[in-house]
Amino acid sequence: MNSRRDFIQKISFSAAALPFLSLRGWAHERENMIMATEEPVLRVALMGLGGYANRVADAMKSSARARLVGVVSGTPAKIKDWQQRFNIPDKNCYNYENFDSIRNNPDIDVVYVTTPNALHHNNVLRAAAAGKHVICEKPMALNPKQGREMIDACKKANVKLLVGYRMHFESNTLEIINRRTKGELGKILFFQGLSGFKIGDPTQWRLNKELAGGGSLMDIGIYAINAARYMIGEEPVWVSAQEIKTDPVKFKQGVDETIQFQLGFPGGAVASCLSTYNMNNLDRFFLNGDKGFAELMPASGYGPIKGSSSSGPLDLPHRTHQTVQMDEMAGIILDGKQPIVPVDGEEGLRDLKIIAAIYEAVKTGQRTDLKV
Ligand code: NDP
């Protein structure tokens, strides 16, 4: 009945028996056990073989339910390299020109889009039109209009659209959400989100408005926005924001270096956040209620995520975020599983609406009402 638990039990049993098996025997045994779970595996093609795709691909090696089977890339040499590294057959390799023919490939379930932000919209529309489920990296798109079109396209094609919000599956994050839901923190009054790093190479796409759609807010500030929502458990109703730019040569028009923003929530809580490309050691979430607090630092890096709270340390064991994410996303796509914090297109769209409102509030200097 509970094949996941059976699987874990079998793995544990066999791990205990490991000293008595040869390595080859162990590998064979493990393969049989995976078969024995009878859980279907999500067959994934990664699109855009850059830094993050490499991380996801490596993490997927340890996933029980997702397997890298294909690639989409504009760089032939990378395709060759990935074929060797991940044992990918020729028939599952595509470039951006012939990618639409993936519709004729029954061996790929989902396209995972890890290209620069500005390409997500077109990439997702094409994957959906080819009848494939889509996982799209954050930020889901450049603006709410694009986000809505992506959701509609996936609905029309009857495929699922998920956004790569890996923190939604992280244990310490979920522990705080659980405590808040149970009322252990009391009435939620305040959230602070500090998200930033000092960005290097001035020629990279993250500093190009056309490809990034903005600056630090699109890339790293989105973690604080998203966390304010899942930590407080409500949607913001107003926003105010202020921009600081110390280097207008590196951070050109439309590419924000640092933005402070405040979000107001219907229950009265306020979030105060900082997004920056000009400071290191800035990865902290703090949630305060009238009965207790919880803090994570680091809060959204690749982990281990750690923190403290009014009732003791927050140090649940670390598992590679992208491995957990892919296991969980396989459950969502293949079994219709419901995550605790949503990762669907509507969730991605809410963040895009808030980002748009923050940029608007920077321009006007006014507090802006918001409906997400
Ligand atoms: P990279 O620059 O490392 O990789 C992007 C890849 O996209 C390139 O290697 C290239 O692959 C492809 N590409 C297609 N067109 C272009 C173009 N015009 N310019 C540059 N690259 C192009 O970026 P990242 O991997 O760091 O980021 C990719 C996405 O993942 C972004 O949306 C980012 O926000 C998100 N991300 C999410 C993270 C998370 O923790 N969830 C962490 C890091 C990034 P090819 O040569 O194969 O075509």
Image: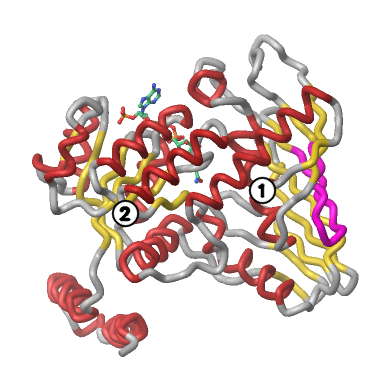
Question: Residue 30 occupies which quadrant of the picture?
Answer: bottom left
Q: Is residue 16 left or right of residue 182?
A: left
- Secondary structure mostly seen in magenta is strand
Q: What residue is rendered at 48% in x and 55% in y? A: 344
Asked whether residue 268 is drawn in magenta, I would say yes
Colour setup of the view: secondary structure
Q: Is residue 132 left or right of residue 218?
A: left
Identity of the amino acid at label 2? Asn
Q: Nearer the viewer, residue 115 or 250?
A: 115
On the image, the x and y values in percent for residue 323 come to: 40, 60
Asked whether residue 25 is drawn in magenta, I would say no
On the image, the x and y values in percent for residue 360 come to: 74, 28
Question: Residue 175 occupies which quadrant of the picture?
Answer: bottom right
Identity of the amino acid at label 1? Val
As drawn, which residue projects farthest toward the front?
Answer: 156
Q: CA distance from mark 2 to mark 1?
A: 24 Å
Tell me which image quadrant ligand 1 sits in: top left
Task: Give the structural element (helix, strand or loop) at label 2.
Answer: loop
**Cβ–Cβ below 8 Å for labels 2 and 1?**
no
Q: Is residue 342 left or right of residue 3?
A: right
Task: Give the structural element (helix, strand or loop) at label 1.
Answer: loop
Q: Is residue 270 above or below residue 101?
A: below
Q: What residue is rendered at 76% in x and 39% in y? A: 274
Q: Residues within 10 Å of mark 2 (few under 14, many from 20)?
A: some
Q: Earlier in the sequence, mark 2 or mark 1?
A: 2
What span is colored magenta in the figure? 261-274
Q: What residue is rendered at 58% in x and 24% in y? A: 200
Q: Which residue is mark 1?
A: 372
Q: What residue is rendered at 40% in x and 61% in y? A: 329
Q: Residues within 10 Å of mark 1 (few under 14, many from 20)?
A: few
Q: Which residue is mark 2?
A: 158
Q: Nearer the viewer, residue 23 or 279?
A: 279
